[in-house]
């Protein structure tokens, strides 16, 4: 089962979007790619938001979302207990004020335009 760690990042106060992006991509990423058992690492820079009037918006702004992918929960836990995780945590304060990590199981629903839903799912 594929497991992902999605981390919402808020840039450090007084840091421009350009400074945040440069540091995240060119300084922090070379640390993150060294996580043991890492299958993939993606950085998603926030370029806009969409809200609905009937759904409250989150309190904090998010400047980026990192996505770390592992083959199993055990691989993820080993990575988060590693020296690389400590190095990444120490570096985080250099470019962000806040972060929140979510551990998620992944279900791929659409691949190459084809819908892959479990048997019995309702399409609406």
Image (spheres, helix red, strand yellow):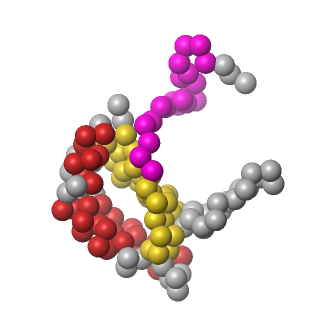
**Vertical side of 6 occupied by 117: above or below:** above
Q: Position of residue 25 (x, y in %)?
A: 39, 68
**On the image, which quarter does residue 56 sit in?**
bottom right
The residue closer to the viewer here, 1 or 29, is 1
The magenta-colored residue range is 102-121
Q: Main secondary structure of the magenta part?
A: loop
Residue closest to the far bottom: 14
Does 82 appear in magenta? no
Residue displayed at 61% across by 63% down: 47
**On the image, which quarter does residue 95 sit in?**
bottom left
**On the image, which quarter does residue 92 sit in?**
bottom left
Q: Position of residue 107 (x, y in %)?
A: 48, 31
**Vertical side of 54 occupied by 2: above or below:** above
Residue displayed at 41% across by 46% down: 103
**Residue 26 visible (yes or no):** no
How many numbered marks, from 0 up? Answer: 0
Task: Indicate the quadrant containing the N terminus: top left, top right, bottom left or bottom right.
Answer: top left
């Amino acid at each position: 089962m594929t497991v992902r760690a999605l981390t919402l990042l808020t840039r450090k106060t007084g840091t421009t979007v350009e400074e945040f992006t440069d540091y995240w991509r060119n300084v922090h990423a070379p640390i993150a790619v060294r996580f043991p058992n890492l299958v993939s690492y993606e950085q998603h820079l926030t370029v806009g938001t969409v809200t609905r009037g009937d759904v409250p918006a989150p309190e904090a702004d998010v400047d980026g979302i990192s996505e770390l992918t592992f083959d199993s929960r055990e691989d993820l836990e080993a990575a988060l207990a590693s020296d690389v995780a400590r190095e990444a945590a120490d570096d985080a304060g250099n470019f962000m004020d806040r972060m929140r990590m979510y551990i998620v199981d992944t279900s791929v629903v659409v691949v190459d335009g084809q819908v892959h839903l479990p048997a019995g799912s309702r399409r609406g």
